[in-house]
Image (cartoon, rainbow, N blue to C red):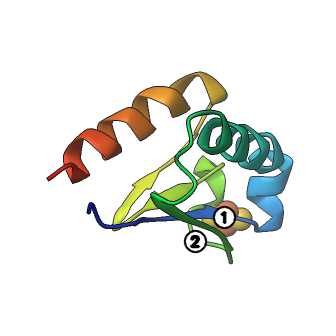
Amino acid sequence: MARKVEMHICLGSSCFSRGNKEVVMYIRDYLKKNHLEDRFVFRGARCMGNCSKGPNLKIDESIFEGLSLSQIDAILEEVLAGTKQ
Ligand code: FES
């Protein structure tokens, strides 16, 4: 079985004002709709020190900054493709 992917969304105030809430809702919905909830550990995180470029999403050791909703499907598909065995 493939490992779980660790995914953290920054919940700091700057990322909040840049739309992290919409990102959280979009990702939760995406995981549910695609039956992927058991493939990811999805949690909130404290400020990642990259406030001017939020919203920031960390997947394993990679940080995706300035995230817009339109990028998320492609990012998650790419991550999943890289974790298949
Ligand atoms: S508030 Fe998100 S990186 Fe600082």
Q: Which mark is residue 22?
A: none
The residue shown at (42%, 27%) is 74
> Label 2 sits on what residue type?
Met
- Is the shortest distance between ligand 1 and the CB of mark 1 under 8 Å? yes
Whichever of labels 1 and 2 marks the residue nearer the N terminus, that label is 1
The residue shown at (26%, 63%) is 1
Considering depth in this image, is 31 or 51 the residue closer to the camera?
Answer: 31
- Is the shortest distance between ligand 1 and the CB of mark 2 under 8 Å? yes
Local SS, label 2: loop
The residue shown at (73%, 49%) is 24
Q: Furthest residue to the front?
A: 1
Residue 10: give x, y in percent of width and height. Answer: 66, 64
Q: Furthest residue to the bottom?
A: 46
Q: Nearer the viewer, mark 1 or mark 2?
A: 1
Q: Name above or below for residue 2 compared with residue 47.
A: above
Residue 13: give x, y in percent of width and height. Answer: 83, 64
Residue matched to label 2: 48
> Label 1 sits on what residue type?
Cys
Q: Name above or below for residue 44 compared with residue 51.
A: below
* Label pair 1/2, CB-CB below 8 angstroms: yes
Considering depth in this image, is 54 or 23 the residue closer to the camera?
Answer: 23
Task: Answer with left or right where residue 44 lies relative to residue 42.
Answer: right
The residue shown at (50%, 29%) is 73
The mark total stands at 2
Q: Furthest residue to the top?
A: 70
Residue matched to label 1: 10
Q: Residues within 10 Å of mark 2 (few under 14, many from 20)?
A: some
